[in-house]
Image: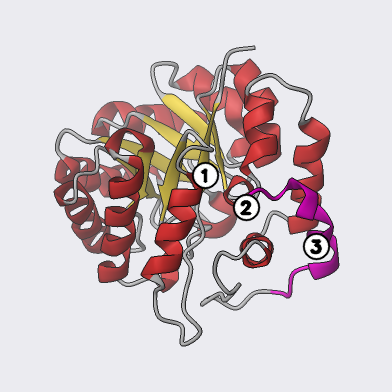
Amino acid sequence: MPRAEVISATPTLFRDDGALDEAANAALLNRLRDRVDGVFVAGTTGEFPALDRAERRVLATLALEIFGPARTVVHVGAASTRDAVALAADAVAAGATRLAVITPYYLPADAGTVRRHFAAVTAAAGDAEVYGYLFPDRTGVTVTPAEFASIAAATGLSGGKLSGAAAARFPEYLAAFPEGRFWSGADAELAAVARAGGAGVVSGLSSAFPEPFMELAAGEDAQARVDEVRAALGGTIEGIKEALRRQGIGNGLLRMPAPAPDVERIAALGRYART
């Protein structure tokens, strides 16, 4: 099985007053630096809809300083094309060479709308690689594999990050756009992603427990441990933040309302935690 990479989708950590906690975010990034292949910042796990432009610039700068441009993917997606273009310009100015952009969301969008949105971001990104981010379960926007391939060819996308229902069709996107690089947001499906020829996973769960995912990526028999982590954390931001809090990183606070995590089940994962 080819080696697939683990890129941690990091949560955004806040102070008790709800403000961005730069020190805690830096601590998390430093903790992951030598334990995963890269980081994906200000994405869904990072609660990007609840972040302002300045905060996203800070997060991008921290990640680039700690991981370097080759190992950092900065998410620049926004509901409006104007904001996504501004975020892309900010990321490139900070030194980013790899960007991801989610489709427009909230208002209905067809393939032509997505193409125009992505084209504006790739133009603003200059020489930086841009990956289209599909998460129809959250955005309400579905882009089929054939549509994505057409959009990528027209706009210069380098590949994509697929989550939710799009991740379930991972092989179809690879087949439709074989020259692109694709990552799945389905953390626990890393082995299947590798077998399909994907680049790897963008994994929020690995932010809290990187070792089982890296072991699985290396071909070790770690699927049961990965599945246990996913079940305990529920694949949720609140679960990831609670696990990190128990490891001394952040306070578990979310800006976006969310259900309470299963603290007892997360506590049982303490044996996987390494400082």
Residue extending farthest to the front is 275
Relative placement, left or right, of 261 versus 88 is: right
Q: CA distance from mark 1 to mark 3?
A: 21 Å
Which label sits on residue 208? 2
Disc 2 is placed on an element classified as loop
Whole-angstrom CA distance, mark 2 to mark 3, is 12 Å
Badge 3 is on which residue? Answer: 267
The residue under label 3 is which amino acid type?
Ala
The picture places residue 232, in percent across and down from the top left corner, at 80, 55
Q: Which residue is farthest bottom?
A: 17
**Residue ID at (70%, 38%):** 188
**Residue 249 circle label:** none
Is 106 or 267 nearer to us in this picture?
A: 267
**Which residue is found at the position 21% from the left and 62% from the top?**
82
Q: Identify which residue is drawn at 79% across, 69% down.
A: 263
Q: Is residue 113 visible?
A: no
Looking at the rendered image, the disc whose residue lies closer to the viewer, 1 or 2, is 2
Q: Nearer the viewer, residue 259 or 271?
A: 271
Disc 1 to disc 2, how far (Cα)? 9 Å
List the residue tagged with mark 1.
8
Q: Which residues are magenta?
A: 259-274
Camera-side mark, 1 or 3: 3
Q: Quadrant of residue 268?
A: bottom right
Say if the magenta span includes residue 218.
no
Where disc 3 sits, the SS reads: helix
Picture coordinates of residue 181, whole percent (x, y): 43, 25
